[in-house]
Amino acid sequence: MNNRALTVATLVGLVLQLAMVVGGHISPDIKNLFAVGGMGFSLVAGLIFANRARAGWSGDMVGGAISGGLCALIGIAVSVVLGDVPVSLLLLGTISSIATGVIGGAVGKLLFG
């Protein structure tokens, strides 16, 4: 596993997630986009991992899953602490974001080789 690629992808995804969480805490319009935005940012994390690591199909998809899931888990946890989402969303949201991270890793493999 390319740790540098994993770190960069996770941090970029996390910054995006946290910006959305803070924005959603302030604005109900942004809060309504938590599901789509959160999974979208996990997909972006997977794309970034694949672009930086170029680890082959399984490597890019696993790295996408880890980076996408981790940034979402932390973002959702912050949102739970702020009282904006229920604790039960930690599991469902993280699993959904792992799946979109895998998709991002696969699309990244197709795009970047």
Image (spheres, rainbow, N blue to C red):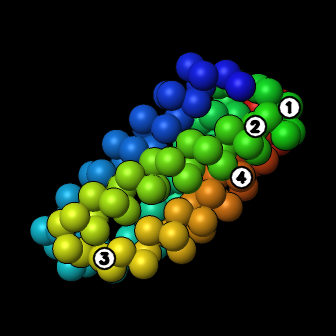
Measured from the top left, where is residue 87 in percent x and y?
36, 75
Q: In which quarter of the image is the C terminus?
A: top right
Badge 4, how many Cα within 10 Å: few under 14, some, many 20+? many
Q: Which mark is residue 102?
A: 4
Whether pointer 4 and pointer 3 mark residues with C-beta atoms closer than 8 Å, the reply is no
Mark 1 is on which residue type? Gly
Q: Along the polypeptide, which appears first: circle 2 or circle 3?
A: 2
Nearer the N terminus, badge 1 or badge 4? Answer: 1
Q: Which of 111 and 75 is in front in this view?
A: 75
Residue 80 is marked as none
Amino acid type shown at disc 4: Val
- Foreground pick, 98 / 81: 81
Determine whether the residue tagged by mark 3 lies in a helix, strand or loop. Answer: loop
Q: Do the residues labelled 2 and 1 touch (CB within 8 Å)?
A: yes
Residue, disc 3:
85
Q: Residue type at mark 2?
A: Asp
Label 3 crowding class (10 Å Cα cut-off): few <14, some 14-19, many 20+?
Answer: some
Numbered badge on residue 60: 2
- What residue did someone put label 1 on? 56
Residue 47 visible from this viewpoint: yes
Circle nearer the N terminus (3, 1): 1
Tell me, yes or no, whether the two marked residues, 1 and 4, touch with CB atoms within 8 Å. Answer: no
**Residue at 79% over, 34% down:** 59
